[in-house]
Each structure stands twice: as C-alpha cells, then as structure tokens.
Image (cartoon, rainbow, N blue to C red):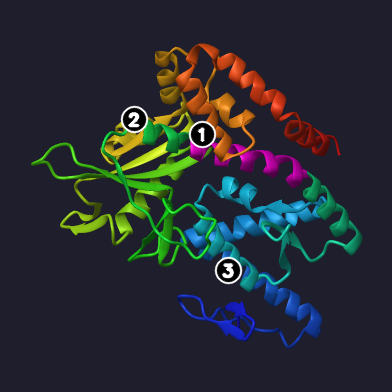
Amino acid sequence: MLGYRTGRGETPFKEGFLITWLDPSKPREEAIEEAIRRTEMALVERSNSSKVMQRIQIVRDQVIEASKLNDLVSFEFLQNKIGCSEYELETALKRVMQLYPEIREVKIFNRFKYFYHSSMSDEDFKKALARKENYIRVVSGRSNRIGHNWEACVEWFIDKFTTGAHFMTQDHRNKNMDRRRITLHLIKSVGGRLSKAEVDRVWTVTPGIFAKPITYVLECKWGLVRKRDVDDFLEVLRWSSEFGVNTPEGRQVKQGVIGVFAGSAFNPREKVKLKDETVVSLPSYASRMNIQLLKASDFNKRLRERGCRKATVQKICKFAKNEDEVREILEAIWQNPEKDGEILAEVVSRNKEVYEFERMLERK
C-alpha cells in the first residue's frame, strides 16, 4: 500500500491508496523489488493525466540524473525545466519527498534549496556541496544586489512621474521590510500560495474631481520575463480579496485595478496563442489582460529626454552597491544630466571593492 508519506505515517492519494502485492513464490527481497517496479509504472501512468504527477516525475528524473554525475539540482533549475511557478514547484517537491524519501533536500546558507539522491556517497556529496557554495557566493550575491537595485529604480520613476499618487503602506513583522510592500489575502491558493501573496507596490491616482480612483499594483523582476511570470501575477490579482471579484464569466480583476509588471527585459520571441487561435506577442497578450509592461527601455527613454547620453538604468543597477545609492544616482543625474557620465564613473570608482570582491569569488 502506497500513499504520500509524512513523519507520522501515510496519507492517501486523491483517488486513494495505491495497493500492490508480493509474489509468495519468489524470495521476499525479489518480490519487494518487483512490487516497487509495479508501483513505479502505475505512478508514471497516473502522471499522464495529472500535472502534479508530471512535475513529480520530472523532478525525480532530474535529481537521479544529477546525482549520478555527483551534482546537486537547484530549485531554480527545476523551475525552469518544468516551466511552472515557484509555488507549484514547492507543492511538487513536497509530494516528491513523500513518495520518494531517498530524494533529499539541503539548504545552502540556510536559504538556497538544492536536491540530491541518497545514493550519493558522503564524500561526493561534500564535494558537490562545496562547489555549489562557491557558485552561490558569486552568482547570487551579484544577482540579489542588482535585483534589489532594479526595484529601487522602478520605485524612483514611479515617484517621479506619477502625479497625485497615494501609496498604500503596511506594517510588517519584519521591520526591515519596506512598508510600501503589500501583502494580499487570497481566497484561493495560487501556484502553491495558500492564503497570502506579496506585491511590490500599490498606489492610487484620482484623475479628476468626479472620476473614480484608479489603483495600480506593481510587480518587479530583473531578468527575462516570460508569459508564465505575467500569468502568475494576474492570478494573484484575480484571487486576492482586495483586487479580485466574481463575475458571470468567472473570477476577474476588479474594474479600476491595473496590474503593472516591470521587467528589465521581455522575451521578444515568445508568442502566445489565444483561445480564438490568434497568436500575439507577449506585450500584446499582457495588454489584453489589462496589465501594463514597463521595460528598462521605457525608463532609458525618459533619461534621454532629460539630456542624459551615457546613463542607462541597466548601468545604474549594475554599478550601485545598494538601493539607497540607486536613488542617489538617479537624483544626481536628473539634476545634472550633462554630467551623467562623470557621475557613473565616480560610482564605479567608489565601488571598486564591491566589484573586486565579486570577481575574487568568481575566480575561486
């Protein structure tokens, strides 16, 4: 009998427990191995009609393959391989480790999730772990810095160009979290989020005395934005108690609420097929879903109009050491656009130790 394994026992699948038998005519060890193969085949057949089971099988296959090569598999790698949201993957991983306890999880620096098969020797595991630690020191340190800088950059432009904007604020248990970052309440789980989801900013604008206020909800991402990122954001808005509403056509975003997705780059090759078989670009698809896309090029256009010739938001995000410095740089070049090159050169000179440290880690 097989189901989802927990620390206290087993719980059944949605359809019930999977039951097999042991052939009494064979040695017990051989009979058990044969029973395991039967359950494996049954689970594979079940996965053909279940997205969750399909993800489970992909995760297991990838972990086993990597472990044979004495390597660990990252959460991000699995997410890109499957093409699902991080919350959908978390659900699949939970099920994987219930079904297959030989699949193990390790958190590097108590934050980054990696997975491996228990068949790896202790020596091979320690070597693989050391390699991943060095990799994370290089890549994640830089990417986190730039990603946070991008959020600060988008925020600065919103503050600068949104006349009459009133930003929503919240107090958080984590006092270091920006009060403008908003937690939404979900009436239905979205991609593994059970009851809550966070968005980067929420603000309202009232166009005129007799006009109803318009609410904008912001999501930021540094890197290549794909359709699944936009869809996940849209689902959060739909199923939030704050911004979603039930209609005869199903759950929809309330009128007067506009989603804003700010990405450093959007996949120019990605095409989206609509229900009427029409194929459109990702920006066109987002527009149909009433989601505005903000690109780095949109902000750079503002800088060019101001008179900047060398500064770009990409350079600012890469050169600044933190979010506060992003805001300082933008304010400085906005006041003195003709000196944007000098301002950036000064930032690069000032942050040499930051870049050298990242390069030092890269060489290790």
Image height of 98 relative to 244, above or below: below
20 over 242 or under it: above or below: below
Instruction: Tell me which corner region of the image, top left, top right, bottom left or bottom right, holds residue 303.
Output: top left
Residue drawn at point x = 63 percent, y = 40 percent? 145
Task: Judge whether residue 48 can be spotted in this image.
Answer: no
Count neighbours of disc 1 (C-alpha within 10 A) and say few if under 14, some if 14 to 19, many if 20 or more. some
Image coordinates for residue 364, horizontal then vertical, percent: 86, 39
What's drawn in magenta, residue-wise?
135-152
* Element on which disc 1 rests: helix
339 to the left or right of 104: left
Q: Which residue is mark 2?
A: 161
Q: Depth check: give the residue in front, 117 or 107.
A: 107
Amino acid on which the number 3 mark rests in the picture: Arg
Q: Nearer the viewer's eye, disc 1 or disc 3?
A: 1
Name the amino acid, label 1.
Arg
Write down the residue under mark 3: 95
Marks 1 and 2, Cα distance to the nearest angstrom? 14 Å
From the viewer's side, name the closer residue of 158 and 236.
158
